Amino acid sequence: MGSTEAGSLARFGRLLKQLRGNTGMTQQELSAMSTVGQSTISDMELGKKGTRRENVSQLDAALAARGVLLGAWDAAFGDGGTSAYFREVAESEHTAIEIREYSLGLVPGLLQVEEYVRVVSVLARPKADPKSIEQTVQARKLRQEILAKEHPPAFIALLDESVLLREFQDSRVMAAQIDHLIELSYRPRLRLQVVPLKAENHAGLGGSFTLMEVPESGTFAYVESQETGFVLKQPDLVGSYDRTFAELRSAALPAPESRTKMKEIRGSIT
């Protein structure tokens, strides 16, 4: 087994274990809901072995993962490969009619200020050299140019309140980021809404995702986990994320109240 394949198996195994843990199921219980043996599930979670795609599909269904597990498998071992789907997302942003994004952990990339990008990149890749970090910063700035176009895509961003409460060693980073979000919230084609912490049972606790509508091909979902990210185009899966976004938006504060909430949080940062 090559090092690349071993790394992919290890990442996939961690994702499988995380998804199983989220459900509270044991390996034995998951095995009973599929034709995949408990020993195979154990080996997969440890990154020791792979399996057939049909088995991954069964596990995805048993875990109610809505394509997350299967998409991760396809991204790592299918024909598309990771570079393919990341390239598709980046290219689609330039022609998108509408982008809808729900963020649970971090400010959406298209809305991040430069220093925020730099800090979170260092935290995510502590061993990366400064040149690599700066390349990430510049690439993010290039992506953000789509919002400055004469006819930018409609952008609806739902931010979990916890995103705004995240603390960094330098408080000025979060202060500048929230100032930027408040400024962006006045743009006519960009709507920012905050999902308050008190909405603790909302449908978005499973993680961040993006819905993007592009000409001709319609809407697809882009889902990220800690280990990977991938595109979903199956109508039933896209529809599921579409419904989740609608539920989240109904739980979010209206735009004016969201702006007030951001100003309150900004005022508490010293």
Image (tube, rainbow, N blue to C red):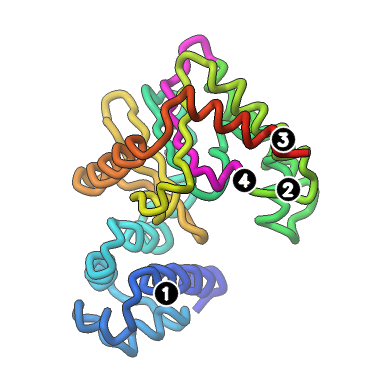
- Residue 28 circle label: none
Magenta span contains residue 112: no
Instruction: Inspect the image, locate mark 3, and give the three-letter code of the amino acid beneath it.
Output: Ala
Q: Earlier in the sequence, mark 1 or mark 2?
A: 1
Q: Earlier in the sequence, mark 2 or mark 4?
A: 2
> Tag 2's secondary structure?
helix
Q: Which residues are magenta?
A: 149-164
Residue 43 lies, in percent from the top left, at 40, 85
- Residue 175 circle label: 3
Q: Whole-Å distance between the Cαs marked 1 and 3?
A: 36 Å
Callouts 2 and 4 close, C-beta under 8 Å: no
**Disc number lying in front (2 or 4):** 4
* Residue of label 1: 17
Q: Whole-Å distance between the Cαs marked 1 and 2?
A: 30 Å
**Which residue: 39% across, 56% down?**
206
**Disc number lying in front (1 or 4):** 4
Residue placed most toward the observer, 95 or 207: 207
Task: Check the image and report above or below for 123 versus 5.
Answer: above
- Residue 132 circle label: 2
Q: Earlier in the sequence, mark 1 or mark 3?
A: 1
Is 42 positioned to the left or the right of 263 in the image? left
Is 246 positioned to the left or the right of 170 in the image? left
Instruction: Inspect the image, locate mark 2, and give the three-letter code of the amino acid beneath it.
Output: Ser
Residue 44 lies, in percent from the top left, at 40, 79
**Disc number lying in front (1 or 3):** 3
Instruction: Inspect the image, locate mark 4, and give the three-letter code of the amino acid beneath it.
Output: Leu
Q: Whole-Å distance between the Cαs marked 2 and 4?
A: 28 Å
Residue placed most toward the observer, 43 or 258: 258
Instruction: Inspect the image, locate mark 1, and give the three-letter code of the amino acid beneath it.
Output: Lys
Q: Whole-Å distance between the Cαs marked 2 and 3?
A: 25 Å
